[in-house]
Amino acid sequence: MSQAMEYRRHRHPGLVTFQWTVEDADGEPELIAVGDCPVCTCKMTRSFGPVQPLIAKGGFLGRRQGPGTEPWTTTCRCESYHQPRPAGAHGCGALLTIAPPPSGLTGEN
Ligand SMILES: [Zn+2]
Ligand SMILES: [Zn+2]
């Protein structure tokens, strides 16, 4: 077993490719990105509702109506115990840019 790395808040410079799926959330498509965080190598899952939420402490990154061609940003959401971690924070502190979902993933109505 590898020891969990320390929590450190920073932006990962690369573009990360995750696996995208769509789930139905109260009639609205919800995009789910699943993949391995490139910083801590833990598996993580991040869901994006119809509107992209604020990124905590990362600034207001804008809301969007649907998946576009812009990169998607998330903090690491793995469930490993990275310390020292502020209350309410998730993962290892990495800020990741995820390649957008493939076109057509949410196109079916
Ligand atoms: Zn991580
Ligand atoms: Zn992790």
Image (cartoon, rainbow, N blue to C red):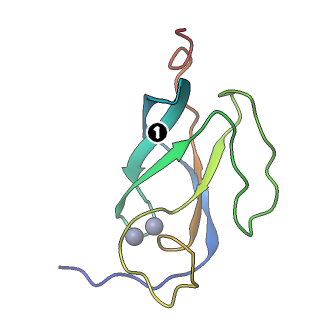
Taking the spot 34% from the left edge, 81% from the top edge, the residue there is 4
Q: Residue at x 68, y 28 (%)?
A: 69
Q: Position of residue 59 (x, y in %)?
A: 80, 62
Q: SS of the residue at dot 1? A: strand
Please state which amino acid type lies under the numbered disc 1.
Ile
Comparing 72 with 22, the one in front is 22
Relative to the observer, which residue lies in front, 107 or 27?
27
Q: Is residue 64 above or below residue 11?
A: above
> Which x, y percent locates residue 3?
28, 85
The x and y percentages for residue 74 are 60, 54
Query: Is 38 drawn above or below residue 51 in the view shown?
Result: below
Q: Quadrant of the C terminus?
A: top right
Q: Which residue bears the numbered disc 1?
A: 32
Judged from this view, the residue extending furthest toward the bottom is 84
Residue 82 picture quarter: bottom left
Assign the N terminus to one quadrant of the image. bottom left
Residue drawn at (51%, 70%) of the image: 90
| Residue at left offset 49%, top offset 49% | 46
14 lies above or below 33: below
Image quadrant of ligand 2 equals bottom left
59 on left or right of 34: right
